[in-house]
Amino acid sequence: MRVVLNTRSDDAVAAACIHDLGRRLAERGVEATVNDWGRYDRYEVAVFLAYDHDVEAARAQNPDIRIVLADPKQRTPGAIATARAADLLLVSSVEQRDVFLRTNRNLLVYTMYPAVAARERQHVDREGGRVVVAYHGNRVHLEAMVHTVRPALEELGRRRPVELRAVYNIETLGRTRLGLPDERLVTVRHVQWTPAFADSLADADIGLVPGELPVANLLGALELTAYPEPEFMYEPFDHLVRYKASTNPGRLYPFARVGVPVVADFTPSAAQFVQDGVTGLLASSAHGWLEALEALAGSAALRERLAAGLRERMDAAYERQLDDFLAAVAAPRLPPPVELPGAAALADQQALADRFPGPAGAPPPSAVARALRRLQGR
């Protein structure tokens, strides 16, 4: 099998799905080349990013080439057309797979693990009960901690000295505004993300992996979204969990590699790796987060045990990835999905996309488009 993996982007998805995948294929003995543009007649498989692709040229030069599209998008009709045309979609999670099954049934959950070397770590209880809590990832998940993790950290800060280390792309996305705790209770360090970001996590005691999005007026939303049907037995105590379709459990991986135990939200992909009490702790409410954080803060032995369990589980999943990729690329293409009654109409969802704005500190869409065109040399 001859594979070309092309990208002009320099981000986490390119690192995982182009550069790291290309390296792993080559180590397996597969003829894999990174960034050989315009010579698709030489290859059997071409891997692109959904927002940085050359699908039309590849098909024109080699009608038989298999197109693999990583991190597909759905906000525009053009993005959906590209996703439908691909022979295989690489999605980051079961959540993303679920929303794309109406577009293309040829999918592989390929968790986008950052490249982080394993480090040994021995947990100890710090003097005065001090605890260092760390986060890494997009700014959006920091903001989304506002009603759950934030009050839990503030209460923890009333009980013991707490430092929160927030590692994210401040230069590009702007400084977080909503989700971080009161600095009179918790010392907060904003750390600019770099490729060596794991260095900022390595001495932490606890890792935060929030994935849920806040629900405005939760009690009102529970009532508003309930059918007038007693057989469903709705209660005001029900969980109502909202999360992004692009939820990525790869954020767990750096913590696992540096030996830091985690608390994660109630998202399906997090729960695939975080078995509560075995490989980490799960929480959704502010009280749930406080209980989990307090348990880990108070026991070095618990931190050590859960961190070791998470590393074992995630390392095993990482090792399976390449076999899964090779099998998916070689598998016969499945027919298109059928339309199902009652399913949300994609066109209706796309029509609402502009009503969901990005963070205040983020560059406007036009600036993002101009930056991407510069990366692509256009």
Image: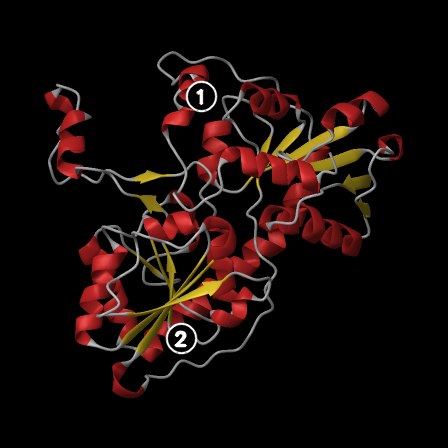
**Viewer-closest of 277 and 258:** 258
**Viewer-closest of 38 and 4:** 38
Label 1: element kind: helix
- Residue type at the position of mark 1: Gln
Q: Is residue 51 above or below residue 166?
A: above
Left or right of 231 on screen, residue 299: right
Hey, which quadrant is residue 239 in on the image? top left
- Residue type at the position of mark 2: Glu
Q: Earlier in the sequence, mark 1 or mark 2?
A: 2
The residue positioned 38% from the left and 11% from the top of the image is: 341
- Whether pointer 1 and pointer 2 mark residues with C-beta atoms closer than 8 Å, the reply is no
Q: Residues within 10 Å of mark 2 (few under 14, many from 20)?
A: some
Q: Is residue 218 above or below residue 337?
A: below
Q: Which residue is mark 2?
A: 304
The residue positioned 53% from the left and 42% from the top of the image is: 92
Q: Is residue 309 above or below residue 88?
A: below
The residue positioned 79% from the left and 25% from the top of the image is: 57
